[in-house]
Structures are given as structure tokens and as C-alpha cells.
Image: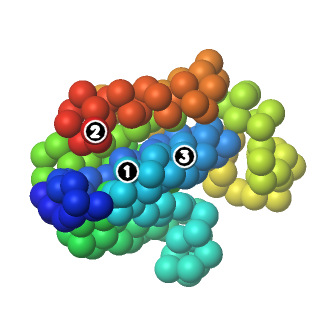
């Protein structure tokens, strides 16, 4: 818990991680960025740690084999842990397709500080969204080991939160996340 003063008002903030997982195009990064704006409006220190950004920097030496995917998520978890230890609320948006890798990350955090948010969206909807054109490339055989097409996505069995991104608007998904955080006393 960190306490600081904002405009004469004492604010107490607990750092934790919201780990957004789901298929490409499900809405993970969009939701993470929306939540970041809410934290900023509350004067809370948060950071969006996005899978694409890490893939182009810290993890640019990794491919998409199962071994490389595991290492990608391990590194993401280590960065997330460093940030939370510094008092930052981390909004981690990673496909993180394997249950074992997500569980490994969960074990790095104290109980209640790792919140898995499954951004549930069927493959056919994600393919129609295809914001980066990746599904089209994967279907054409240009991209190998693409999650949902030629590589498996193991959906979480017991996430703290499931948002149905195919049935709900972005604002409705955000409202669901905010309600959960308020119920847990993590956001006022």
C-alpha cells in the first residue's frame, strides 16, 4: 500500500496487475488503455504493458514456438513484477495462450494482486475485426504458429473476471471491470 496526498486529499493505492488474456483482436489492449485512462483520472499510477510493444523491444529476439512464447510471457511477468514492486498498477495485455505460462506468472505475485481478465471473444469475431491483418496472413500461410489458427489458445478455467467482448461494448466491459475492482476495494 502506498499513501500520498493529492490536492490535500490522502489517497491510498495498492499495486496489482490486471492480466488481460485472449485471442488477437479480442480487445485486450483496448480495454487496458481504457482502464489506464480511468486510473489516471483517479490520480493513480498505472502502466499499459502491451504484448506487441514488448515483442518489438525486449522480446524481439523471440519467435512464436511454444518455447519462445513461454519465454516471452516469463519476461513480461518479470517486467510486470518490477513495476508492481515500484507501486504501479500494471495493465498487461498479452495473448498468453498457455495455461501453464499464466499460472507461472500468477505464482510470482502475492495472493489477490494478480487479476486474470479473460477477454472472451470467439475466433470468428476476432477474425472479422483483424485490426492488424494477422488472421488473413495466418490463413494464407504467411504467419506460422498463429494463436487460434495454427497454434492453440487454452482459455482460462478460473479467471477472476470474464468479459464477453463479442456481446458487450467496450464501455460495458470497462464498467464490469471497474465494478469488480470496486467490489474488491481496489478502486474507489
Q: Residue at x 50, y 80 (%)?
A: 58
Asked whether residue 11 is in view, the answer is yes
Q: How dense is the environment of label 1, judged by Cα within 10 Å: few (below 14), some, or many (20 and up)? A: few
173 above or below 49? above
Q: Which residue position is annotated with label 2?
A: 188
Give the mark nearer the N terminus: 2 vs 3: 3
CA gap between label 1 and label 3 equals 13 Å
Q: Is residue 183 left or right of residue 38?
A: left
User: Which quarter of the rendered picture does the N terminus lie within?
Assistant: bottom left
Q: Which of the labelled discs sits on residue 32, or is there none? A: none
92 above or below 20? below
Q: Secondary structure at mark 1?
A: loop
Toward the viewer: 142 or 162?
A: 162
Q: Secondary structure at mark 2?
A: loop
Residue 106, horizontal then vertical, whole percent: 25, 50
Describe the colour scheme in one phrase: rainbow
Marks 2 & 1, CB-CB < 8 Å contact: yes
Toward the viewer: 111 or 84?
A: 84
Q: Secondary structure at mark 3?
A: helix
Q: Which of the labelled discs sits on residue 34, or is there none? A: 3
Image quadrant in which you'd find residue 44: bottom left
Q: Residue at x 49, y 34 (%)?
A: 174
Give the mark nearer the N terminus: 1 vs 3: 3
Q: Is residue 6 left or right of residue 142?
A: left
Q: Which residue position is annotated with label 1?
A: 42
Amino acid at each position: 500500500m502506498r499513501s500520498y496526498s493529492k490536492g490535500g486529499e490522502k489517497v491510498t493505492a495498492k499495486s496489482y496487475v490486471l492480466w488481460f488474456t485472449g485471442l488477437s483482436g479480442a480487445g485486450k489492449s483496448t480495454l487496458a488503455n481504457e482502464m489506464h485512462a480511468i486510473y489516471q483520472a483517479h490520480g493513480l499510477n498505472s502502466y499499459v504493458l502491451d504484448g506487441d510493444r514488448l515483442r518489438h523491444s525486449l522480446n524481439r529476439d523471440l519467435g512464436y514456438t511454444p518455447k519462445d512464447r513461454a519465454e516471452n510471457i516469463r519476461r513480461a511477468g518479470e517486467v510486470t513484477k518490477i513495476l508492481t514492486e515500484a507501486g504501479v498498477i500494471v495493465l498487461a495485455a498479452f495473448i498468453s495462450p498457455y495455461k501453464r505460462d499464466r499460472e507461472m506468472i500468477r505464482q510470482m505475485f502475492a495472493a489477490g494482486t494478480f487479476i486474470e481478465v479473460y477477454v472472451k471473444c470467439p475466433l470468428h469475431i476476432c477474425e472479422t475485426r483483424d485490426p492488424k491483418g494477422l488472421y488473413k496472413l495466418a490463413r494464407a500461410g504467411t504467419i506460422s504458429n498463429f494463436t487460434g489458427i495454427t497454434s492453440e489458445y487454452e482459455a482460462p478455467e478460473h479467471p477472476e473476471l470474464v468479459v464477453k467482448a463479442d456481446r458487450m461494448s467496450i464501455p460495458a466491459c470497462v464498467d464490469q471491470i471497474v465494478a469488480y475492482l470496486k467490489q474488491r476495494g481496489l478502486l474507489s
